[in-house]
Amino acid sequence: MRAMLLVNPKATTTNQRTRDVLIRALGATLDLTVEETRYRGHAAQLSRGAHASGFEVVAVLGGDGTINETVNGLLNAEDGKRGDDGSAVDRPALLVIPGGSANVFARALGLPNNPVEAVGAVLEAIRDGRRRTVGLGQAIWDNQSRYFTFCSGLGYDAEVIRAVEGIRGTGRKATPTRYVNTALHHYLSTDKRHAAMTVEGPDVPPTGHIFLAIISNTSPWSYIGSRPVSPTPWASFETGLDLLGLQRLGLPSMAHLMPQIIGARDTLPTGGHLVQLHDEKEFTLSAGRPVAFQLDGDYLGEVERITFRSIPNALQVLV
């Protein structure tokens, strides 16, 4: 099986020695070509090239950001074809080896968070011919479009990601502790009085006064160390998109919500200040002022209007 492996040399949880071991293990089973990513957007460029060159598999050793770029490259390849049902016809399958700080997509697929153990699991999947077809989300804004594998967000959570990316720019790693500390520090300064957002869609009546919106393609939304964070526990790769919107950001409301979303859960959080959607094909969030926007943990700037769509049966994953 002909495969291209995209390696992020700056991945948080791997070093050169570990990467060499993983590459040798994969190379013993696959006809492997290895490419290192060198700049932002490079993984998308490489995966488009792999599609055009007829590779059967595109593997990723990296974090959620590198995986997101790779997926967008595969789905935006110029020669990609889609069947009448929207499923991938000739697109390379995706193989994921977690190497980032959170690895939400890989863990949502059921892979071990340890990259060595994950390679063992995907080699078993290759041997047994196991593939899973997953749906994706798509965000459309300002004449731009981008797919996401597990989540997007507007408002407070995107502000936190923006702050953490600023910290990473100084050379410090994005650890779970750093995310939590940044979130707590940023909570003190975020606007908790003037909600900017409204959600509506073909099957969604307009609902406003939203401070924070979490859009999910699967669950969990993220992790704090080994503990999942599940604000939309019914979300899955086999259904449409889910949303949790917060109409209050005050301390009592947050204190009521947080215990309900931390840990493995299958019940929706409760509270009169929550806006919840499940299994939606499309909806739009609009804001009275620019709000921070993130996608798969990658800060993408500020937006005032953005449409989210569910893209079913978009990708095959070896898992």
Image (cartoon, rainbow, N blue to C red):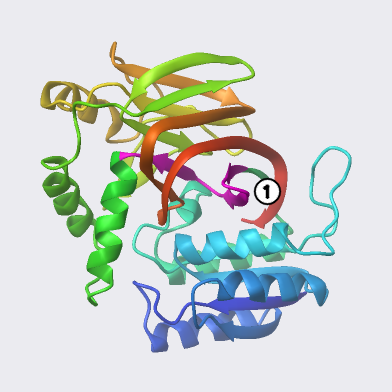
The total of numbered circles placed on residues is: 1
The answer to whether any part of residue 167 appears in the image is: yes
The answer to whether any part of residue 226 appears in the image is: no
Q: Which picture quadrant has residue 197? A: top left
State the residue at coordinates (71%, 53%).
316
**Disc 1 marks which amino acid?**
Arg
Q: Is residue 282 above or below residue 105?
A: above
Q: Tell me where the magenta segment starts and ends, as one range.
A: 137-155
Quarter of the image for the C terminus: give it.
Answer: bottom right
Measured as percent of width and height from the top left, residue 265 is found at 36, 29
Measured as percent of width and height from the top left, residue 305 is found at 50, 36
Magenta stretch: includes residue 176: no
Residues 135 and 311: in front is: 311
Residues 111 and 45: in front is: 45
Q: Tell me: 220 left or right of 143.
A: left
Q: Tell me: 160 left or right of 126.
A: left
Magenta stretch: includes residue 143: yes
State the residue at coordinates (34%, 34%).
264
Quarter of the image for the N terminus: give it.
Answer: bottom right
Q: Which residue is denoted by mark 1 in the rendering? A: 132
Secondary structure of residue under mark 1 = strand
Q: Tell me: 243 left or right of 195.
A: right
Measured as percent of width and height from the top left, residue 82 is found at 84, 49
Measured as percent of width and height from the top left, residue 75 is found at 71, 57
Q: Is residue 8 above or below residue 218?
A: below
State the residue at coordinates (74%, 59%).
129
Is the magenta region chiefly helix, strand or loop?
A: strand
